[in-house]
Amino acid sequence: MLRVMTEPMLAHAARHHHPREEGVTIDANENPLGPSPAAREAVIAMAAQGGRYCDWLTDEFVALLAEKEAVKPEYIRVYAGSTEPLHHAVAAFTSPQRSYVTADPGYEAGMMVSNALHVRVVKVPLAKDKHYAHDVRAMLAAAPDAGLFYICNPNNPTGTVTSHADIEYLVENKPQGSIVLVDEAYLHFSDATTAMDLVRADKDVLVLRTFSKIYGMAGLRCGAIFGRPELIEKVETYGGMNFMPITAVVAASASLKDAQLVPERKRINSAVRSSVFAWLDRNGYSYIPSQTNCFMLDVKRPAKEVIDAMAKQNVHIGRIWPLWPTCTRITVGTASEMEQFQVALKKVMAGAVMARVGPVTSRTSSRVLGELPGLGSVDT
Ligand SMILES: Cc1ncc(COP(=O)(O)O)c(C=O)c1O
């Protein structure tokens, strides 16, 4: 059985609170703004039709998406979120002989599917000297047997961007028969260039998009995979063709029709993020500059201690990637949530709140942390 593993499950596994509890939950890269007003209205108006399949609503949504992305509708398949097409693409293009190649740290879902399928997972550290972009040359060198290269652009958990030139280089130099899966879940928060032009050019490229992030529809569930029909059909062998929840497709359609939504939310996210980064700089904390709704904070001690101590302050952050045990991912919430995050972090880093009973050592004092440079000092 191929178990679907997605962000809320990964966040849940790392959590020790119930997200319904009081407090600030910034551990699952959710959008605190939720669906847009037009999307909400569409959901409510659609509820009465919930007894019918209304399959034409999905067709209408696909037509809208096709027009927006300038691809033919047969280049698109929609799903209840992008998790399923991600899993199915891994299943379709990897095998015990064809490896799965990913960045480290990177979004774990594809890796987990690969493990379940006994596929070799090749993890290649992000390129520190390229602002933590994917190291496409190292990825190529590490896996002459590659079946699928997973490029998360911008990357989860770092929010760092890989250039279009590097993605093109990967596509042009990859082993024959392999494909490049570009996961653009966080694209709209950033200034990254989409790889959709490579789909339009019929390259060996699949692009994933989701309505869970900038559109704030994680719980409503809508996502899509784009690629030339022959590739999409291979993905579909592993599942698909199910009916979409009609509430999700009408909410997604309403979101697409609102031309102001993406720029407005990008602006809000970027303003809150910049203000958090300025605060981190002022206080001498280390982090990796990000272009999305999440970033990696280096707490310079086992990050688990800080996550636990923050939870005691009712601020829920996480999670940790084994390559960087002193870093934890932080989701950018609302301005007020991030103020609460800052108050709690300051207390925790000063040693005023500890997850474990024990003395504050000089390593964990704010004085020592205050001496550290504010920018990207994470060692890979
Ligand atoms: C990079 C990336 N891809 C895919 C997903 C899956 O999201 P969904 O199934 O909600 O579209 C997530 C969720 O956080 C993600 O971070």
Image (cartoon, rainbow, N blue to C red):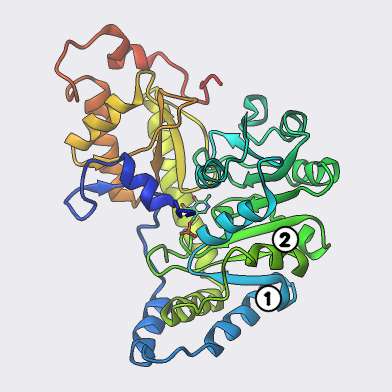
**Spot occupied by residue 362 in the image (x, y as percentages of width and height):** 28, 7
Tag 2: amino acid: Met
Count residues near mark 1 (Cα–Cα under 10 Å), then give few for <14, some for 14-19, many for 20+.
Answer: some
Tag 1: amino acid: Ala
Residue 141 vs 370, above or below: the answer is below
In the rendered image, which quarter is residue 227 located in? bottom right
Q: Which mark is residue 196?
A: 2
Q: Report the front residue among 8 and 258.
A: 8
Taking the spot 73% from the left edge, 33% from the top edge, the residue there is: 143
Q: Is mark 2 within 8 Å of ligand 1?
A: no
Count residues near mark 2 (Cα–Cα under 10 Å), then give few for <14, some for 14-19, many for 20+.
Answer: many
Q: Report the front residue among 109 and 263.
A: 109
Q: How many marks?
A: 2
Q: Is residue 183 visible?
A: no
Taking the spot 44% from the left edge, 82% from the top edge, the residue there is: 246
Residue 21 vs 275, above or below: the answer is below
Name the element at disc 1: helix
The residue wearing badge 1 is: 66
**Spot occupied by residue 340 in the image (x, y as percentages of width and height):** 25, 42
Q: Report the front residue among 333 and 101.
A: 101
**Spot occupied by residue 111 in the image (x, y as percentages of width and height):** 54, 42
Name the element at disc 2: helix
Q: Is residue 56 left or right of residue 70?
A: left
Taking the spot 37% from the left edge, 50% from the top edge, the residue there is: 9
In the rendered image, which quarter is residue 309 located in? top left
